[in-house]
Image (spheres, rainbow, N blue to C red):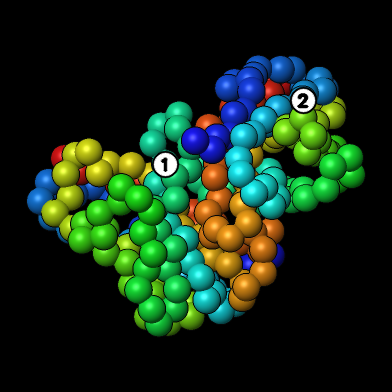
Amino acid sequence: EDKVVQSPLSLVVHEGDTVTLNCSYEVTNFRSLLWYKQEKKAPTFLFMLTSSGIEKKSGRLSSILDKKELFSILNITATQTGDSAVYLCALTQGGSEKLVFGKGTKLTVNP
Amino acid sequence: GAVVSQHPSRVICKSGTSVKIECRSLDFQATTMFWYRQFPKKSLMLMATSNEGSKATYEQGVEKDKFLINHASLTLSTLTVTSAHPEDSSFYICSARVGTRGYAEAFFGQGTRLTVV
């Protein structure tokens, strides 16, 4: 069965720390991997990755995909309390409308 | 980015009643909308894909007679939970896609917390 596994499930850090969130997957016919940030309600889109080794960057957030080892990481540098959220990893597959989500990593950034 | 509005954000209903949740794309036309369900500490699970003007496509294990989806216009899709039971209590989220673009263009509503008592 296809699956998306995120780790850790939760993480507590102090402001200023750097964190790395992991997403590994086993799916057939992989098309793309997406990262979302979910605060109290709706997930908001962060990155979409389709090619190995190309880092996507937005401010303090960056992400990269390794299609050989079947994982992606999301890095957040100089964390702030506003980064506290659940970070979701999701996959799309060729020929399917589905977004397959992992369970998410709950990040808490303390002042 | 595009805005998707979902209403209501929270609803409490009695067991056996029906609840309608609306999902609107405010500044774009959404040919495809998706309905997800999320249990505490669990993944977002796709329930169904709603295409404007045609029947929704339900995921395996989702009862189409219980979760009625209507996508009558390019800006509105509704999910009706019929004869709700406590086990239907969950967080329901819709997302809408712009045209036929990829998932980077799928925007999520704020979600609806349904509690059936």
Mark 2: which amino acid?
Thr
Where in the figure is residue A51, as x and y percent of width and height? 83, 48
**Camera-side residue: B111 or B39?**
B39
The residue at the point 72 percent across, 27 percent down is: A21
**Label 2's element?**
strand
Percent of width and height locating residue B100: 62, 73
Q: Among all residues in the image, which is located at the extreme front?
A: A28
Side of A55 relative to B109 (left or right): right
The residue lying at 77 percent from left, 50 percent from top is A50
Question: Badge 2, how many Cα within 10 Å: few under 14, some, many 20+?
Answer: some
Look at label 1 and name its amino acid.
Gln
What label does residue B13 carry, if any?
none
Q: Is residue A16 above or below residue A58?
A: above
Q: Based on the displayed image, in which of its 4 quarters is residue A26 positioned?
A: top right
Residue at image position (35%, 50%) is B60
Please report, as a chain letter, where disc 1 is located: B
Rendering coords of residue B41 (x, y %): 45, 29
Q: Tag 1's secondary structure? A: strand
Q: Residue furthest left?
A: B16
Name the spot of residue A63 as percent of width and height, x first.
Answer: 81, 39
Q: Which mark is residue B38?
A: 1
Which residue extends farthest right?
Answer: A54
The residue identified by callout 2 is A20
